[in-house]
Image (cartoon, helix red, strand yellow):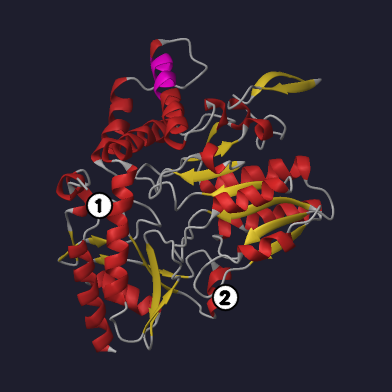
């Protein structure tokens, strides 16, 4: 594998600093990845050279900004291999994408007594919107459980699906367990029963090569800020057949064709779901982030991060008193754990004092914590810029904290 880690790290100025007089080790990319200079420069160039509002201007600045904006839509379409650019909707992030589908799909297709299957390992953002929709439509949420290894019990799925099932919501990769779920298998089973599937890809697109046509996903969502892009931008992919049928999520400018007091007609896809002025700057900068991912190669990134995951897992298992949550055969770049006798928050604070950034708490996944009977844990997560040397620093710090207790 040709992976020039020093060159890659040189793109991220923020990594080359000290925290509490210690070299920064950033192990929280699952929460939000750091931004490369390509993204920072794209923002600056836009506002220095040609910024204008998109789609509606009749001048050079607006036209050029519109072209740049729409080129990112095409880049994303190719990145996830969507059939049409009309299937790429810009949102504020994965959370808004979930809410969009939970509102609009359920408004059209879910009625009283219907059911929505949601996996037990979901982020809150892929549970609460479905609960709100179910409450509004008097429908029912059905849990798809996982076992103590962090593997979904999909052998139970056929018995959960019935004529009332309208949709299954599942994460491609768990943000706590790191489990890579068999979404192709889930989608195939769902479609055999005329059930749609929403896939939360927030923890997948930065680590795995995604082909939404091959997956046959009905909806697939992800966020720019976890993919080395800016925050405040996300993507909802939806099959055209669904997007054409479901009602708009928000009303306003851009999403209309014609407005009168007698009634309103809606714009064509994808603008039907993009009410108001979007986050133009961040969308264009997001294009730069995707460009960097393509340049490095997702296959290379996946292999590099898998080597980090395997190395860190083996080192962590040597730490006395550790309990790792999520040991599925198929995992991505996340390890969550606790150490006996040390509160997860105390551990996180002490690691921070040693320059190591980790995530602590319930990780926006209460149902996962409840499964294991814990209040929270520590999570480390890797990005394309992390190294085995950083893992060694982390393990040494972990052992130092353990001895303190």
As displayed, is residue 6 above or below residue 65? below
Left or right? Give the position of 247 relative to 182.
Answer: right
How packed is label 1: few (under 14 Cα within 10 Å), some, or many (20 or more)?
many
Q: Which residue is drawn at 77% across and 42% down?
A: 109
Q: Mark 1 points at which residue?
A: 385
Secondary structure, mark 2, is helix
Image quadrant occupied by the C terminus:
bottom left
Quadrant of the rendered structure where residue 318 is? bottom left
**Res 113 visible:** yes
**Res 261 visible:** no
Q: Mark 2 points at which residue?
A: 371
Q: What stretch is highlighted in magenta?
A: 61-68
Check contact, mark 2 vs mark 1: CB within 8 A: no
Name the spot of residue 253 as percent of width and height, x first. Answer: 61, 25
Mark 2 to mark 1: distance in Å? 32 Å
For the residue pair 243 and 138, the one nearer the viewer reads as 243
- Please check the rendered image and state whether residue 67 is part of the magenta-colored stretch, yes or no: yes
């Amino acid at each position: 594998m040709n992976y020039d880690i020093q060159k890659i790290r040189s793109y991220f100025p923020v990594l080359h600093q000290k925290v509490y007089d210690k070299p920064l080790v950033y192990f929280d990319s699952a929460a939000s990845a750091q931004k490369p200079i390509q993204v920072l420069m794209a923002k600056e160039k836009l506002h220095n050279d040609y910024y204008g509002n998109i789609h509606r201007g009749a001048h050079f600045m607006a036209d050029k900004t519109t072209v740049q904006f729409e080129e990112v839509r095409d880049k994303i379409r190719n990145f996830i291999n969507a059939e049409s650019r009309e299937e790429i909707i810009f949102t504020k992030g994965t959370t808004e994408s979930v809410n969009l589908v939970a509102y609009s799909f359920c408004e059209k297709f879910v009625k009283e007594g219907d059911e929505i299957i949601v996996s037990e390992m979901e982020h809150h953002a892929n549970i609460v919107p479905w609960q709100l929709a179910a409450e509004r439509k008097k429908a029912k949420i059905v849990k798809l459980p996982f076992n103590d290894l962090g593997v979904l019990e999909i052998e139970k799925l056929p018995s959960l699906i019935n004529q009332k099932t309208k949709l299954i919501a599942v994460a491609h990769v768990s943000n706590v367990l790191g489990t890579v779920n068999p979404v192709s298998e889930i989608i195939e089973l769902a479609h055999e029963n005329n059930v749609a599937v929403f896939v939360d890809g927030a923890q997948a697109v930065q680590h795995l090569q995604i082909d939404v046509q091959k997956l046959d996903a009905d909806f697939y969502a992800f966020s720019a800020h976890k993919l080395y892009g800016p925050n405040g931008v996300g993507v909802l992919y939806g099959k055209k057949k669904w997007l054409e049928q479901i009602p708009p999520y928000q009303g306003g400018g851009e999403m209309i064709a014609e407005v009168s007091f007698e009634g309103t007609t809606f714009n064509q896809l994808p603008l039907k779901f993009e009410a108001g002025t979007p986050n133009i700057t961040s969308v264009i900068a997001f294009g730069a982030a995707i460009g960097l991912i393509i340049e490095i190669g997702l296959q290379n990134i996946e292999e590099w991060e898998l080597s980090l995951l395997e190395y860190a897992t083996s080192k962590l298992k040597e730490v006395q008193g550790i309990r790792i949550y999520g040991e599925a055969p198929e995992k991505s770049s996340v390890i969550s754990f606790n150490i006996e006798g040390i509160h997860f928050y105390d551990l996180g604070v002490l690691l921070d004092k040693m320059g190591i950034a980790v995530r602590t708490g319930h990780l926006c996944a209460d149902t996962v914590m409840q499964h294991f009977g814990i209040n929270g844990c520590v999570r480390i997560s890797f990005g394309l810029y992390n190294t085995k040397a950083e893992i060694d620093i982390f393990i040494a710090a972990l052992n130092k904290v353990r001895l303190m207790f």
